[in-house]
């Protein structure tokens, strides 16, 4: 820790309560000012943290008083609905009183939870204390904190609240403050992460442009989300109707008859409509999750903010950054679009939280990669031609085997399907070979593979914790080997598939000569 | 080790890794053979059961081409198992090698496909030794070297207990001294 010495001997001023923070405009309002980019003072807290004498013990503080409102909203809604139903069906029956009792109990529970939960910020740790049933103190050392995420769902945002998640890696565990005021959340993040003077400058490294939302249908991931939503909605309606006795066998059958009775033209028109709606809906879903996607740099960490309804903010410590990953599929490649992710050690749910750009033109993604880890090395060195036949064989093998099996067992239709798949696999295998590559620029190693989901990883040499060289019997006959660089972040290992055997060893030896050269064969006498 | 035929290796002598210095204990052959015997014995039993069941039931759901030949299944499984039990352990014994020098753990494992693993002691996080019941009978132990990455974690099985214990202690000590786990 670099800044620890300056902090010894002072405690952080406890949060004075909602009134002190309430006179500031809500954090969401002045966020729009970041549009111009460049250096920007993060002016959420009007006064610097007061320096306290050493002996004084920091006071525990509660979550925001409005917290229980948000917490109880869901229970409230459910209970109100149940109570109203009970009233409608049976008047002032036992069910109604039960609902009322449940409601008051739920409220009481939330208030008690709020009263008994406190958090204390010490010089070296933050403690979360809970004393509702039994007593628990969770202590998170501040130098273990790897990230502080702030998120706010719709009710939270309406009340000016935010949830703070403290991530302390595998050994420190996690803690959540649900919820504090937005100002307090920002202050906590600043204090817990920067460990230094208040309001460090923050720079905008990258920001989503409006046009890029149109890339959403390319990724495919968002294309089917509307169906999932519609499906779950239909399921809910069905269950609800079933519970209330609205759905009977006759009605379901009559709907079925109606559907069957529809004219073919109408069905085709509906199908076309759905197909047209898919990309449009995917853009909406994409915007919902990635609205105003912004990457800031603040001291030693990256802050990534995104989301339309629920605004999510993830902090990634730069000193835990080991590399980046560029991923795309054939459609995105054709449009020159790529996704950028960070490889961070000890980051849970890395696929979502490590995201640095959800979809952006490749030059933008590479520029951001260059700013966080260094220029992406290139151009990639192609792998030997022997690798091509191996890629094609592997792609074709499985469908071809199934086709043969289908012929042997006399299933002509399956044979046709698998035959077509086998033929289609040839260009896939060829493209997989074309995408293979590796390169190092002396500081960073980059490896690329895959076609339908092509991934190029850029990893710092210092992040490599081991080498694994793999050779199957088939690879051995072709003089090929797969070199895996083991890295304690991301997937744990990144492979250069089917390199020439000598090149694989030479690459490893070039990057970490200390570990590899002692085990090299002395040049033979041939 | 023989040189494989290299046509255009890209230099006079493309670098090659030499095999690690030490073999594992010869008793490891027995260990692997017993393991394979148990697994394939179970598979053989299952195959016998399935063949008997399908043959007797005369069930309509089974296509004709299958029910006629189901009697071959136990033989096929048995032959594969016999091959595995006799060939694979010896093959593995010839491949499995290990070495710790220059503060790097260097292992070669596998049989049909081979893996060479190089892990510097400074990047090791934990070193475990463990013994299954077969290993205890044979006086063997498995040593597991873990780094921050599962791809960089290696396992050497078939070491004599004394060697494994000494090695684990030694590695743990040096890992503590050299620690730089890149996390």
Image: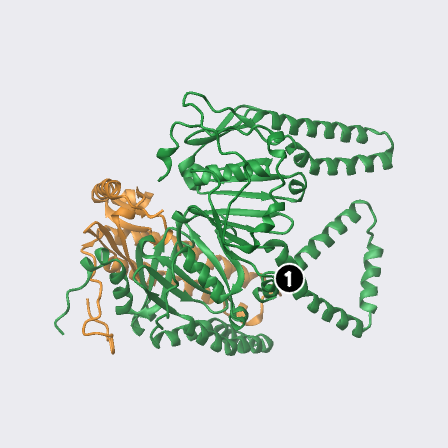
Chain colours: A green, B orange
Q: Residue at x 69, y 38 (%)?
A: A74
Give the image location of residue A379, x and y in percent. Answer: 37, 70
Give the image location of residue A364, x and y in percent. Answer: 49, 63
Q: How many marks?
A: 1
Other-residue count near label 1 (Cα within 10 Å), few / some / many at <14 / 14–19 / ≥20: many
Q: Residue at x 60, y 64 (%)?
A: A211
Above or below: residue A351 compared with residue A130:
below
Secondary structure under the numbered disc 1 in the rendered image: helix
Q: Is residue B112 visible?
A: no
The quarter of the image holding the C terminus of chain A is bottom left
Above or below: residue A367 compared with residue B64:
above
Give the image location of residue A441, x and y in percent. Answer: 32, 64
The quarter of the image holding the N terminus of chain A is top left
Q: Residue furthest left?
A: A525
| Residue toward you, A351 or A194 | A194
Q: Residue at x 51, y 24 (%)?
A: A59
Q: Which residue is mark 1?
A: A283
């Amino acid at each position: 820790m670099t800044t620890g010495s300056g902090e010894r001997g002072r405690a952080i001023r406890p949060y004075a309560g909602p009134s002190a923070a309430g006179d500031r405009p809500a954090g969401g309002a002045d966020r729009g000012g970041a549009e111009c980019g460049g250096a920007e003072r993060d002016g959420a807290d009007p006064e610097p943290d007061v320096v306290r004498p050493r002996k004084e013990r920091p006071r525990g503080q509660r979550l925001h008083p409005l917290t229980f409102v948000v917490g109880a909203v869901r229970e409230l809604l459910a209970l109100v609905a149940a109570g109203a139903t009970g009233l409608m069906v049976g008047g002032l029956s036992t069910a109604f009183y039960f609902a009322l009792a449940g409601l008051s109990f739920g409220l009481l529970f939330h208030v008690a939870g709020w009263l008994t939960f406190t958090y204390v910020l010490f010089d070296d740790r933050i403690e979360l204390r809970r004393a509702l049933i039994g007593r628990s103190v969770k202590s998170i050392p501040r130098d273990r904190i790897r990230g502080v995420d702030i998120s706010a769902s719709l009710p939270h945002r309406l009340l000016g609240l935010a949830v703070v998640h403290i991530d302390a890696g595998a050994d420190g565990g996690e803690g959540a403050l649900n919820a504090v005021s937005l100002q307090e959340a920002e202050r906590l993040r600043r204090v817990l992460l920067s460990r230094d003077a208040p309001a460090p400058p923050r720079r905008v490294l990258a920001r989503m442009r409006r046009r890029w939302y149109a890339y959403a249908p390319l990724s495919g991931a968002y294309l089917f989300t509307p169906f999932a939503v519609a499906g779950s909605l239909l399921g809910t309606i069905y269950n609800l109707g079933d519970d209330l006795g609205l759905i009977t066998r006759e009605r379901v059958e009559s709907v079925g008859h109606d559907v069957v009775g529809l004219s073919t033209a109408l069905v085709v028109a509906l199908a076309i409509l759905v197909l047209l709606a898919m990309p449009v809906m995917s853009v909406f879903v994409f915007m919902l999750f990635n609205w105003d996607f912004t990457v800031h740099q603040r001291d030693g960490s990256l802050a990534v903010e995104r989301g339309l309804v629920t605004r999510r903010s993830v902090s990634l410590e730069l000193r835990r950054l080991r590399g980046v990953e560029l991923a795309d599929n054939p459609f995105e490649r054709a449009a020159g679009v790529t996704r950028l992710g960070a490889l961070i050690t000890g980051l849970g749910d890395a696929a979502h939280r490590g995201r640095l750009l959800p979809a952006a033109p490749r030059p933008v993604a590479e520029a951001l990669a260059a700013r966080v880890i260094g220029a992406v090395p290139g151009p990639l060195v192609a792998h030997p031609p022997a690798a091509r036949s191996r890629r094609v064989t592997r792609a074709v093998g499985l469908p071809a085997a199934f086709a043969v099996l289908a012929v042997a067992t006399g299933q002509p239709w399956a044979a046709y399907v698998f035959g077509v798949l086998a033929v289609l696999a040839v260009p896939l295998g060829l493209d997989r070979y074309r995408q293979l590559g590796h390169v190092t620029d002396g500081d960073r190693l980059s490896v690329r593979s895959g076609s339908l989901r092509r991934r190029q990883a850029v990893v710092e040499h210092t992040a490599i914790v081991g080498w694994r060289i793999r050779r199957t019997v088939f690879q051995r006959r072709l003089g090929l080997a797969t070199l895996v660089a083991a890295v304690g972040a991301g997937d744990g290992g990144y492979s250069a598939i089917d390199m020439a055997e000598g090149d694989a060893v030479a690459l490893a030896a070039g990057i970490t000569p200390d570990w590899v050269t002692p085990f090299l064969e002395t040049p033979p006498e041939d | 080790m023989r040189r494989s035929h290299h046509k255009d290796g890209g230099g006079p002598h493309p670098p090659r890794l030499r095999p690690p210095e030490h073999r594992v204990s010869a008793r490891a052959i027995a260990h692997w053979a017993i393991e394979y015997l148990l697994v394939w014995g179970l598979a053989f039993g299952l195959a016998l059961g399935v063949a008997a069941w399908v043959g007797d039931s005369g069930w309509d759901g089974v296509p004709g081409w299958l029910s006629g030949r189901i009697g071959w299944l136990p033989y096929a499984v048995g032959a594969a198992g016999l091959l595995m039990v006799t060939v694979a352990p010896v093959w593995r014994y010839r491949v499995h090698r290990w070495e710790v020098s220059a503060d790097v753990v260097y292992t070669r494992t596998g049989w049909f496909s081979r893996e060479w693993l190089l892990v510097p002691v400074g990047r090791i996080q934990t070193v475990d030794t463990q013994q299954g019941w077969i290993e205890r009978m044979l006086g063997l132990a498995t040593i597991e070297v873990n780094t921050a990455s599962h791809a960089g974690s290696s396992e050497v099985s078939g070491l004599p207990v004394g060697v494994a214990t000494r090695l684990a202690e030694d590695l743990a000590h040096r890992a503590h001294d050299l620690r730089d786990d890149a996390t």
